[in-house]
Image: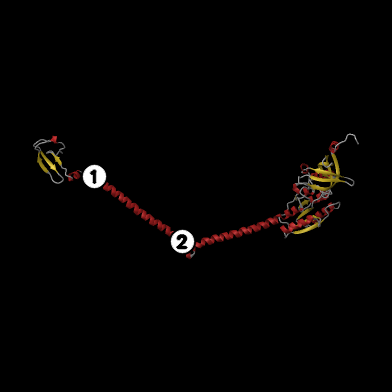
Amino acid sequence: MNGKHLTVSELTEQIRQNLEGYFSSVLVEGEVSNCRPASSGHLYFSLKDSSAKIDAVMFKNRLRTLNFEPKDGMLLRARGSLSVYAPRGSYSIVCEELEIAGAGEILAMLEKRKQKLAAEGLFDTERKKNLPRFPGVVGIVSSPTGAAVRDILNILTRRASGLKVIILPAVVQGDDAAPAIAARIRQANRWQLADVLIVGRGGGSLEDLLAFSDEEVVRAVAGSDIPVISAVGHEIDFPLCDFAASLRAPTPSAAAELVSENFSAISDYIQKTAEDLSAIIHARLERARLFLKPFAPQDMEYRFRAILQPRLVRLDDAKDLLIRSVSDKCRELRGRIDLSKAVIEAGSPLAAMERGFSVVTDEGGNVVRNAKNVRAGDRLCIRPHSGSINAVVENTQ
């Protein structure tokens, strides 16, 4: 016991190096248990068989690549690497890929069958039939006790209560499912039992849905004279009958909504049209009432005054303005005349003569402006404001 010893961390590190180095890539198959998605988006679970169990984790970046949801009890095949978690001294497999056990072989078989049927033209668009706008009878080929039928009936009752529904019971899982489903489709066509068929079931594993990829079912769907809506599983499920059907619905509930879509739409349209029509009628009646109101006898005098009074006021205002304008113009012209008269009178010789001035002219009638122009003894005529005076010049200065 006195030899060189290892710490727990050193021992765990050696185990980690050996395990992770030797098991860097493993492929293991087992049943899922204790499946618990974490808030971080990672998925933690265990894979077990009859004798052992191993913890497993799939991180969210790889989890997005899955086309199914892992659940307890599923038989899965995982590819990944071993990882040691030192704080707990435990190891687990970090999954890079997950697939349902046997799914690889099943998918390969389905792809081969799909190519074969497609080559025969069973998936051609030209073969698909248009759904009736307002089907009278809807046929449902499914298990009568399954949740899918209950969902379909609930939706049809709510959205298209007058629509008739015929349930064509058939097992939807197991070896007897495909012949039963195909027989019901052929029976519906033989007796013209419905205007549209919904063929489907609820979700399940790849193996559970195999009946709807059976060649007999696909041929029955493709050969149906009645339009077929394929409504199998969830949105991520694509059985082969989806490609042969006239229309694919992601879920049975969605198929019921597609069938009743026009019923719901026409009901909503009728209700909206009735509301719009009522609103239009009320609006027009109100406009007519408002239009006729002014013509009531008690309102006529008021309306007459309302029309005439503003015009009378405007006439009076115009008359007053015209009178004021003419008066102002007359006063202006009168002032100008008086001013002109004063100017003329101020410049008149008679005005000066009224103030005592006289005009002196010589014998030739020339106005004497300078004493130098006359001599003693000259006769002059003096004209005051009134009359005239004859004078003789005695001397000049």
243 or 37, nearer to the observer: 37
Three-letter amino acid code at the position of disc 2: Arg
Is 43 situated above or below 136?
above
The image position of residue 294, as x and y in percent, is 49, 62
Helix, strand or loop for disc 2: helix
- Residue at left 12%, top 41%? 381
Residue 212 location in percent, x, y?
A: 81, 50
Marks 1 and 2, how far apart at CA? 62 Å
Along the horizontal axis of the image, is 371 left or right of 60? left
Q: Residue furthest front?
A: 2
Residue 81 seen in this snapshot: no
Residue at (52%, 60%) from the top-left corner? 291
Q: Nearer the viewer, residue 237 or 26?
A: 26
Q: Which residue is mark 2?
A: 303
Give the crowd class for mark 2: few <14, some 14-19, many >=20 residues within 10 Å. Answer: few
Looking at the image, how many numbered discs can be counted on the residues? Answer: 2
Residue at point 51% right, 62% down? Answer: 293
Q: Residues within 10 Å of mark 1 (few under 14, many from 20)?
A: few
Q: Which residue is mark 1?
A: 344
Measured as percent of width and height from the top left, residue 11 is found at 86, 37
Task: Find residue 397 and report its horizontal and vertical position in percent.
Answer: 12, 35
Q: Assign a secondary structure to mark 1.
A: helix
Amino acid type, residue under disc 1 in the picture: Ile
Farthest residue toward the right?
Answer: 1
Q: Tell me, yes or no, if residue 382 can be seen here.
A: yes
Q: Closer to the camera, 159 or 310?
A: 310
Give the quadrant of residue 362. top left
Mark 1 vs mark 2: which is more N-terminal? 2
